[in-house]
Amino acid sequence: MQRSTLAKRAWLLFFFVAFLFYIYGLGHMPLIGPDEPRYAQVAREMLVRGDPVTPTLGGRPWFEKPALLYWMMMATFRAFGVSEWAARIGPALSGLLTGLLLYFTGRRIERADEKLKRRGLGLWSGAALLSSVGMIVFSRGVSFDILITMTLA
C-alpha cells in the first residue's frame, strides 16, 4: 500500500475517532450545572412561543447571552425533539467544525509559504485542537464558548 494512501486512512481514522469523542453519549447525562438547563429552557421557551427574537426565561425577557446558541437549540429541538442530546449536538458539531476550519486555514498557509509545503500544518493543527481535552469537554456541553471559538476560527 502506498504511503500516501496509508496516511490518508490514518487521518480518516483519527477524524472518525474524534467524531466519536465529540458526539457519542451526548444524551446519556442530564443537563448539569446551573447553565445547561437554563440555556436549554430559554431555547425551549423560544420554540414554544414561536419567537426567535426575544429570549425568555420563566416568561420574562432574558438578554444575558447572544442568541446563536438558542437558535441552534431551537433548530435541533424542532428536528429531534427536546432532549439533552438535541441541546448538546449543536456545540459538539461546532467543536468539530472548528477543527475542520483550522485544518483548512493551515492548508491555506501551507500553500502560501514554500517552506511549509508538505509539512502537514493543516492536519497537525486540526488534530492537535480536536484531541485537546479542553476542546472535547467544552464541545460536549451546552455552552457559548465553543460557538464563539468557532466564529473566531
Image: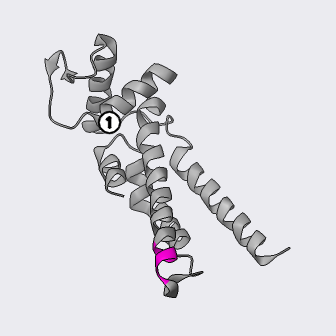
Residue 136 in sight in this render:
yes
Image spot of residue 37 (x, y percent): 30, 30
Looking at the image, is 71 positioned above or below residue 59?
below
Q: Which residue is drawn at 48% across and 44% down?
A: 93
Whether residue 136 is in magenta: the answer is no
Which residue type does callout 1 highlight? Leu
Looking at the image, is 109 positioned above or below residue 57?
below
Looking at the image, is 36 positioned above or below residue 78?
below
Q: Main secondary structure of the magenta part?
A: helix
Residue extending furthest toward the right: 1
Colour mode? one colour
- Report whether 72 appears left or right of 108: left
Looking at the image, is 28 positioned above or below residue 109?
above
- Report whether 135 appears left or right of 144: right
Residue extending furthest toward the bottom: 115
Q: Which residue is drawn at 38% across and 32% down?
A: 72
Image spot of residue 89 (x, y percent): 47, 38
Residue count near mark 1 (Cα–Cα under 10 Å), binned few <14, some 14–19, many ≥20: many
Residue 82 in sight in this render:
no
Residue under label 1: 69
Residue extending furthest toward the top: 49
Image spot of residue 69 (x, y percent): 32, 36
Specify the segment rendered in magenta: 109-113
Image spot of residue 82 (x, y percent): 43, 21
Q: Residue at x 28, y 21 (%)?
A: 52
Give the quarter of the figure containing the C terminus. Answer: bottom left
